[in-house]
């Protein structure tokens, strides 16, 4: 199994590198107007894209090392529906907690 679903997948990295996300990122980052208020906020497109790469790297590691190993368990137990309530497996609940 892979150690990181992002860094071990050249296709995902290719898309992040080659897609022109400038307009989308500029909108998401409020045209880079927040660094005065939030010092860690990106100051420009390159800075924002680097932040997204770091985030995707961390997320890729969490998914590969903590979530994926329990996916079969979650699938086998399945979601339960009783009295109008949906109950997720422990593995699914823990995965969701990791992503919060």
Image (cartoon, rainbow, N blue to C red):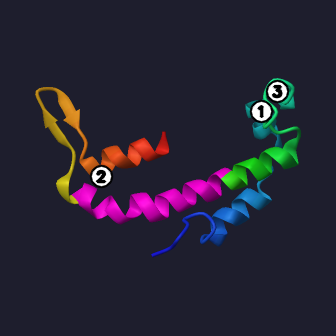
Pick whichever, 98 or 24, lies toward us.
98
Tell me, yes or no, whether the two marked residues, 2 and 1, touch with CB atoms within 8 Å: no
- Classify residue 9 as left or right of residue 66: right
Label 2 residue SS: helix
Q: CA distance from mark 3 to mark 1?
A: 8 Å
Tell me, yes or no, whether the two marked residues, 3 and 1, touch with CB atoms within 8 Å: yes
- Classify residue 80 as left or right of residue 56: left
Which callout, 3 or 2, points at the residue further toward the start of the chain?
Answer: 3
Where 87 sits versus 37, above or below? below
Where 100 sits versus 6, above or below? above
Pick whichever, 18 or 57, lies toward us.
57
Pick whichever, 57 or 19, lies toward us.
57
Magenta region = 55-75
Task: Report the residue marked by disc 2.
Answer: 91
Outermost residue toward the left in this view: 83
Task: Report the residue marked by disc 3.
Answer: 34
Q: Quadrant of the N terminus?
A: bottom left
Where 40 sits versus 13, above or below? above
* Location of residue 34 by image quarter: top right
């Amino acid at each position: 199994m892979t150690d990181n679903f992002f860094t071990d997948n050249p296709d995902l990295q290719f898309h992040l590198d080659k897609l022109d996300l400038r307009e989308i990122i500029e909108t998401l980052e409020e045209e880079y107007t927040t660094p005065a208020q939030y010092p860690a906020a990106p100051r420009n497109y390159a800075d924002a894209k680097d932040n997204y790469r770091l985030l995707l790297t961390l997320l890729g590691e969490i998914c590969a090392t903590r979530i994926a190993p329990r996916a079969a368990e979650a699938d086998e137990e399945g979601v339960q529906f009783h009295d109008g309530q949906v109950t997720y497996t422990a593995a699914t609940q823990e995965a969701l907690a990791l992503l919060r």
